[in-house]
Amino acid sequence: MNAKEMLKYVDHTQLKAFATWEDIKKLCDEAIECDTASVCIPPCYIRRVNDTYGEKINICTVVGFPLGYSVTAAKVAETQQALEDGANEIDMVINISDVKNGDFDAVEKEIKTLKDVVGDKILKVIIETCYLTEEEKIALCKAVTNAGADFIKTSTGFGTGGATLEDIKLFKEHIGEKVKMKAAGGVKSVEDLEAFIKEGCARIGTSSAVKMVKEYLEKK
């Protein structure tokens, strides 16, 4: 797989709190030019992106982001609004407090609730691996699978650490066959992109993929 083909796996991301409309437009224009899997944008920009670009672009957004401890009803409301505004993919953050309290039933129930809202659109579940033990990661692989989510995702990119190949290998051992994997946070080179894709990731979340691929191709 060449570097340009790797961009088809990328959720081209701009989630900074101070992202301007010019930042979002630049992201969308790059995504169209490079044929990325989606743009991952703040919820407040979904409708404007949808109105501006229509079917030219696949919109992904975040729910309960970045800390995850919103109540389920708030996450449901966020999800419903995002879908109404034009999002096709939802990246939700789990309630990590529930995990630390050992209440995996609550985590699974919340994921299932949001998947019921999302329906045939895509739900990715961010478990924020940097805060978890190996046992918690394994338990969450099972919760994500049992709840019927489409993806398990490593990280928000706003925590203390991002994706690692070790976590992706662990996911592969414990998720169901219908669950795909997304690596996010810390993917900073074409070599990183290649490594995560080779390990089985169907999506990569990063803000820098387009820039680093272009720079890589210019050097060749």
Image (cartoon, rainbow, N blue to C red):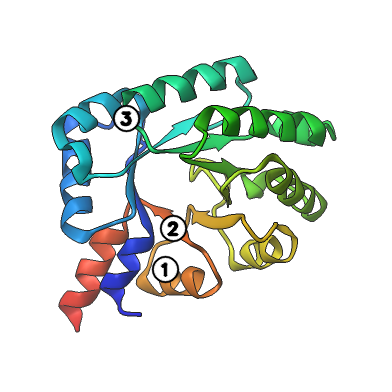
Q: Secondary structure at mark 1?
A: helix
Which of the 4 quarters of the picture holds residue 42? top left
Dot 3 or dot 1: first in sequence order is: 3
- Amino acid type at circle 1 is Leu
Is residue 41 among what the camera can see?
yes
- Residue 49 versus residue 147: which sits nearer the camera? 147
Is residue 65 among what the camera can see?
no
* Pointer 2 local density, CA inside 10 Å: few below 14, some 14–19, many at least 20: many
Location of the C terminus (image quadrant): bottom left
Q: Which residue is mark 2?
A: 204
* Pointer 3 local density, CA inside 10 Å: few below 14, some 14–19, many at least 20: many
Which of the 4 quarters of the picture holds residue 92? top right
Q: Which residue is mark 3?
A: 86
Q: Are marks 2 and 1 in contact (CB under 8 Å)?
A: yes
Q: Which residue is mark 1?
A: 193
| Horizontal side of residue 174 vs 160, given as left or right | right
- Pinpoint residue 10: horizontal percent, then vertical percent: 36, 57
- Amino acid type at circle 2 is Ile
Location of the N terminus (image quadrant): bottom left
